[in-house]
Amino acid sequence: MADRAGLKFVGFIFASVTLAVMLTTGMVVKGYADGAYSLDNAAIEHTGSIR
């Protein structure tokens, strides 16, 4: 069975990664909302109908 110190360390690592992902996602969403980024349809070439 794992000791509490090891479990606390693993929990800290998971919490840190979760926080980093949440902050990054929030920054990207805010960037899209502010118009800093845009989804450009012109970059996708149309090659014909999809069958």
Image (cartoon, rainbow, N blue to C red):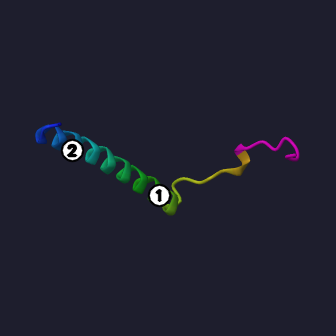
Q: Is residue 49 left or right of residue 4?
A: right
Who's the residue at 30% across and 50% down the image? 19
Who's the residue at 37% across and 48% down the image? 21
Q: Main secondary structure of the magenta part?
A: loop
**Residue most extreme to the front:** 1
- Mark 1 surroundings: few (<14), some (14-19) or many (≥20) residues within 10 A: few
In primary-sequence order, the first of circles 2 and 1 is 2
The location of residue 29, given as percent across then percent down, is 47, 58
Q: Amino acid at mark 1?
A: Val
Of residues 47 and 15, the one nearer the viewer is 15
The location of residue 46, given as percent across then percent down, is 82, 44
Q: Is residue 7 left or right of residue 18?
A: left
Who's the residue at 52% across and 58% down the image? 32
Q: Amino acid at mark 2?
A: Phe
- Secondary structure at badge 1 equals helix
Which residues fall within the magenta stretch?
43-51
| C-alpha span from label 2 to label 1 | 26 Å
Mark seen at residue 12: 2
